[in-house]
Amino acid sequence: MLRPLYFLWKVFGLASYSYVADRRNKRVATDYGYLNYTFTVIWLFIFTVGLPVQILALNIFDFGSQTLFIALMLYYISSYTSAIVAVFWVSIIKRRMFLEIIENISEVDNKIRYTPQIENCMNRNVMFNIISEIILLTVNQCFAIIYNIPQYASVPFYIIIIKTISNVPDICNILVLFQFFNLVFMTKQRYSHLNKRLTNWINVAVSSPVYLDIENDRRRQSNRAADHVIITPVCVSSFGNTEGTLKQADIRLLRQIYSELYDITCLINDTYGIPILATMCWMLTGVLCSLYEGLLNFKVLGLTDAVYAITYSLLVFKVTLFCHTATNEARSSRILVQKLLLEGNCMNECTEDLKMFSLQLQVMKNRYTACGFFSLNLSLFASVVSVIASYIIIMVQINK
């Protein structure tokens, strides 16, 4: 599923490994040879040299506003810095963490044991996200190139090279976000599937008979004996079978899967915490710079800046939305376990395990953060929108 993005990550230095065929074991292994760091080193060098060159190139143009010049300078600094941090952190410092996350997700899949229909549906959803992301990235860059062609006709050649290279950090930052998007989405799918299992258990437990007291129980049993009717209680589905009583092993397996998903969430935060923090700063300055430049030069650059502002806003919204839904999916498990306990149709051993499971869910709180500084959720997006509006007002007033 991730193969289309893998080649993009490889070209832009975000995947410092390659896949080689292991004929003895008949499997695919990963190689961390020196040649795999070629693109990583090249882009690190270009970004490091390109940052001061880009800042010096800003002095050539007359922007007509000191505030706009400072905003553009902050934007390029954040863009190049976040790209350097992303490439260095993901490809060198945490180069093995991405594959470890994928392997852990595969281990969880082996324990869940999907049906072929469910597995195909999950794969199609991930593939749809990847294709839509690639299309968005391609359309955005093609629009920028086509729109800037008339402007390149009257500028020196070295300015064209600088402008072209200045788009590469943006692509690199977006590709890091795509890595983060898909890993969070894949984790959310596993939480959602397990919550469906809990919901099925609750629905079956509700339909089974609940005896309020011993006297009513005896009356029902006597009526059954008199009518010579054998009533089989409704069974609760387990992991291995579609029908069968809720077993202690099923709950323990569920607890183990949730524990592994919690570890995957921690790995994602540890791997992408610093790059996401730098990328969020880049997107915030990008929205501010695009909106402010569009307001000042509405007739000339209004459409281009509007497209960039919308793109950055959509990226921020997608980050916060995916993390928010994944966190809520994990939190909803607490409610489902409590509902299953309230039905009171489980055996004593299962009840004790459900209580331990409820305690485990309270301790293992899943949330996605930007290096621990703030949580990634829709509340953050609302705060970002208010901050952007406030800064735009302040910048317009300063320009006056």
Image: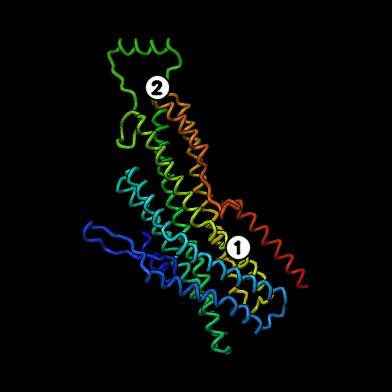
- Tell me, yes or no, if residue 227 can be seen here: yes
Q: Position of residue 278 (x, y in %)?
A: 57, 62
Q: Residue at x 64, y 58 (%)?
A: 385
Look at the image and tell me in which quarter the N terminus lies: bottom left
Q: Which mark is residue 209?
A: 2
**Which residue corresponds to mark 1?**
281
Q: CA distance from mark 2 to mark 1?
A: 56 Å
Residue name at image x 78 percent, y 73 percent: 400
* Residue shown at the point (52%, 51%) measured from the top left: 323
Label 1 secondary element: helix
Report the mark closest to the observer, 2 or 1.
Answer: 1
Q: Which mark is residue 46?
A: none
Task: Measuring from the top left, give residue 386's x and y in whole percent.
Answer: 67, 57
- In terms of sequence position, does the residue under pointer 2 or pointer 1 come before the other? 2
Q: Position of residue 136 (x, y in %)?
A: 47, 67
Left or right of 22 on screen, residue 298:
right
Label 2 is placed on what type of residue?
Answer: Pro
- Label 2, residues with CA under 10 Å away: few <14, some 14-19, many ≥20: few
Residue 355, x across and y down, in percent: 47, 29
Give, as a three-letter code, the residue at label 1. Cys
Left or right: residue 235 compared with residue 381: left
From where the camera sits, is residue 294 visible? no
Instruction: Give 213 or 366, whichever is nearer the viewer.
Output: 366
In this rendering, position of residue 297 left or right of residue 194: right
Q: Is residue 290 above or below residue 204?
A: below
Q: Is residue 206 above or below residue 222?
A: below
Q: Residues within 10 Å of mark 1 (few under 14, many from 20)?
A: some
Q: Residue at x 38, y 59 (%)?
A: 127
Q: Please give left or right for residue 188 compared with residue 372 in the image.
A: left
Circle 2 SS class? loop
